[in-house]
Amino acid sequence: MVVMKGAPLFLAKNRKWVLTASTFFVSLLLALLPVQEKFLISGFVVRISYAPFFRIAEKIEDLSHLAQTNRELLQAVVQLRLANARLKEAQLQQERLREKPEFTGPASNYLTPATIFTLAPDQPPRSAIINAGTMHNVRRLLPVIDHYGVVGKISAVSTGQAVVQLFYDPAFRVAARDQRSRVLGIVRYKQGLNLVMDNVPNKEDVQPGDTIITSGLGGIFPAGILIGQVHTVHTDSLSIFKSISVEPAAQINRLEEIFVLNVPLLTEPLINEKVLAP
Amino acid sequence: MKQAFSFLFWLFIIVIFQSLVIALVRVAGVAPDLALVLTAGIALRRGSTEGLLFGWLSGLLLDVLTPQSLGVGMMLRGLLGFGLGNFKDNMFLESILAKGIIIAIAALVQGFIYQVWTTGFQPGTLWWLFWRYGFFTALYTGLVGMVWFAWWEGKMRAHLFKRIRVSSVT
């Protein structure tokens, strides 16, 4: 039989209180440790106790988010498909624009794209309604072009729509220039499907096949926009002006995308259709 | 040895609860203190020494998740386990409700002292923490404690009846 004496006996008799004091003392010691030491001890205990379960929790959370992520990805796929379709359409449009390298319109950030709502029923059509208005910064008298050249100008405008006076309107005028010989004139509609270039003296050099562009002198159209090509030139000895027929570059009956040249008018228009109208 | 395994098992349950389950049972930022429920359960069944040890170890497991306050939770939980274990023979705690109330009060006291220590006794912050978290955590913990005791005592009762039946047959 073992008989305990001294300290072992005291410990055995007061086991509960010794244990309480020990745990209290160790806890107090830990509580008073510097933060760095606390982090070291905690990190060690977390690694051996919690770490595997934290990884499991992470996996479970990933799985629970999978369905939501899947839905979001499907939505993104549909949006990308739509965007892809739009880009393909834009590419085709750009290819059409590139077919006419002589087109030298202003910078694209001045263009307000628009589409035709309706063309006037008369033939050839004199006006068209487009889907751009004051809310798109479209104003009256702004020039309208397509990827071939001059189409017309804005004659009336509302919030979301505008009326385009097409070059087939007999009241339409545009200041023009022969690109080769630099001869100036005024292009307007008279009859048929071609335009005429007026005010070109007999002695001036204008040949069939010459390119006619805007001169920029009318105050509405900037210079350099293609109007068309000279079809025929007649010189009448009884007249002081040539009779020039111009085949328009833009094909009104095939209009698709048009652009309003959203540039500030440099001057008041020199050609007033009301004054010049026959 | 059996008691050591039992301790390890319940400590393992605390680890799983804190890492996997707590996010699922949290309501408006308030989660039950399962470690305290288990400490109270062990202390009220087995006595102060077991309550002290389990409270202290479970406190260590919780404190390592907030290293700045390492030691504080261990001390409080150990002392609570010890205190509840000492009251074991002096309190008439047959009803589940009474045990739930004791656990809720223990949670309230533990939460308050813990916040006093960790906030450096700032009355404004303490008041806010008490009403926003402490009070509701204590209520939630008390409810969970009642459920746990109901389950545990049902299990013990079934075990006791089985033993009585076996002894009466033999």
Image: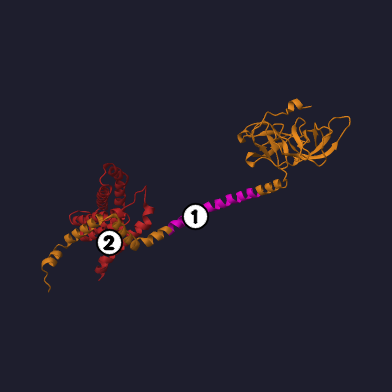
Chain colours: A orange, B red
Q: What chain does mark 1 sit on?
A: A
Q: Mark 1 packing: few (<14 Cα in 10 Å), some, or many (20+)? A: few
What is the magenta range?
A59-88
Rendering quarter of residue A257: top right
**Distance Cα–Cα, label 2 vs label 1:** 43 Å
Q: Mark 2 packing: few (<14 Cα in 10 Å), some, or many (20+)? A: few
The one nearer the camera, B60 or A168, is: A168
User: Which percent across, then down, holds residue B1?
Assistant: 25, 68
Q: What chain does mark 2 sit on?
A: B
Which quarter of the image is occupied by the N terminus of chain A? Answer: bottom left
Helix, strand or loop at mark 2: helix
Secondary structure mainly formed by the magenta segment: helix
Which residue matches tag 1?
A: A67
Which quarter of the image is occupied by the C terminus of chain A? Answer: top right
| Residue A65 is one of the magenta-drawn residues | yes
The tag on residue B156 is 2
Tell me the residue at 70%/29% (across/down). A269
Identified by mark 2, the residue type is Met
Count how many numbered circles sit on residues in the image.
2
Identified by mark 1, the residue type is Ala
Answer with left or right where residue A5 lies relative to residue A203: left
The tag on residue B31 is none
Answer with left or right where residue A81 lies relative to residue B10: right
